[in-house]
Amino acid sequence: MSEERSAALSRKDFVSDQEVRWCPGCGDYSILAQTQKVLPSIGIPREKYVFVSGIGCSSRFPYYMNTYGFHTIHGRAPTVATGIKTANPDLSVWIATGDGDGLSIGGNHLLHTIRRNLGVKILLFNNRIYGLTKGQYSPTSGLGKRTRSSPMGSVDYPVHPCCFALAADGTFVARTIDSDTKHLAMVLERAARHEGTAFVEIYQNCVIFNDGAFDSVEKGDDRAVHLVDGEPIVFGANREKGIRRKDGALEVVTLGNGVGEEDLLVHREDEPDPGIAFHLARMDAPSFPVALGVLRSVRRPTYEEMVEEQIRRAREEKGPVDLDALLRGGECWEIK
């Protein structure tokens, strides 16, 4: 398909004929709609897209995308996606996963996908609960969270998904929220255009089992800060507050009385050291606003690029190889 034809695609081209089966009011609808809206603008033919999922509410995503897709097993979407992308580097491969699917049983697989910098897009729907299995606490549920599986309150410290991705040296790490469709679309487009692993944590409201989990982020001007590359970090209803770095730590300051924007931390997406992005990712109420936006975006050779290069060099150095001789060569022994 030519680029001219792909450029003419619209959101309707990415809408499948399947009935969408999420609870009325679920944040997944917003994520699905914005993804279908953004993809036509990327300029990639529709048949080049593949969506892969594991198990969970979010993992029904491939059914609703009019693209190629796989609904795989619990936590293993990164594994299947790795095979797809490595064998077909020209495909745009997306992973839809939830906090339970991706960070519990699938945590190991997610970790290695990110640290390898495989050229895939990972959408982690974070509703801080197991929704599909009726409301058990998940790896991202807060300490003390009362659920059907923790009636006295969870005694597990939660995983911070963006910190997890940054600790794996992720080359693109971002956070957004389902209710802010403009911001969500912006982050999805940035992720789509990133070369390498693009990890996006999406705060997603579960109206049945964890309704209002992100109300504090949505309803307070001083509860969230939108990161802008190259600009000082300012927030508040009247942009009267900011984030300053002092003695290696972050602190909230009020502008005025000798404190100006020139004293604030300037956000740098391409900072080679992920340390500051890690601090920003950990910011949380009540002491800090939650950071939304692109925390880190750096360029590094991808896994599939290096695999292709290694294959090319092997062919140059060793020439044509007889597979049978290869299998029978080296150290062989007979078991009796």
Image: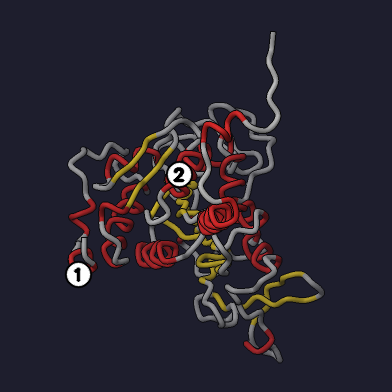
Q: Is residue 307 left or right of residue 91?
A: right
Q: Residue at x 61, y 44 (%)?
A: 142
Q: Quadrant of residue 249?
A: bottom right
At label 1, counting other C-alpha atoms closer than 10 Å, the crowd grade (few under 14, some 14-19, many 20 or more) is few
Q: Which mark is residue 239?
A: none
- Residue 4's label in the rendered image is 1
Per the model, the C-alpha gap separating discs 2 and 1 is 28 Å
Residue displayed at 71% across by 66% down? 275
**Residue 106 visible in the shown view:** yes
Q: Are marks 2 and 1 in contact (CB under 8 Å)?
A: no
Q: How is the image coloured?
A: secondary structure
Q: Position of residue 273 (x, y in %)?
A: 70, 69
SS class, disc 2: helix
Position of 115 compared to 172: left or right?
right
Which is more toward the observer, 139 or 124? 124
Q: Is residue 122 left or right of residue 165?
A: left
> What residue is drawn where x is 55% and y is 57%?
316
Q: Residue at x 56, y 63 (%)?
A: 301
Q: Which residue is mark 2?
A: 81
Residue 12 percent coordinates (x, y): 18, 55
Camera-side residue of 155 and 74: 74
Element assignment for label 1: helix
> Three-letter amino acid code at disc 2?
Ala
Quarter of the image holding residue 64? top left
Query: Looking at numbered disc 1 in the image, what kind of residue is underneath it?
Result: Glu
Asked if 269 appears above or below 167 in the picture, the reply is below
Location of residue 174 in the rendering, given as x and y in whole percent from the top left corner: 52, 62
Q: Report the residue that reaches farthest toward the top.
A: 336
159 sits to left or right of 10 = right
Q: Residues within 10 Å of mark 2 (few under 14, many from 20)?
A: many
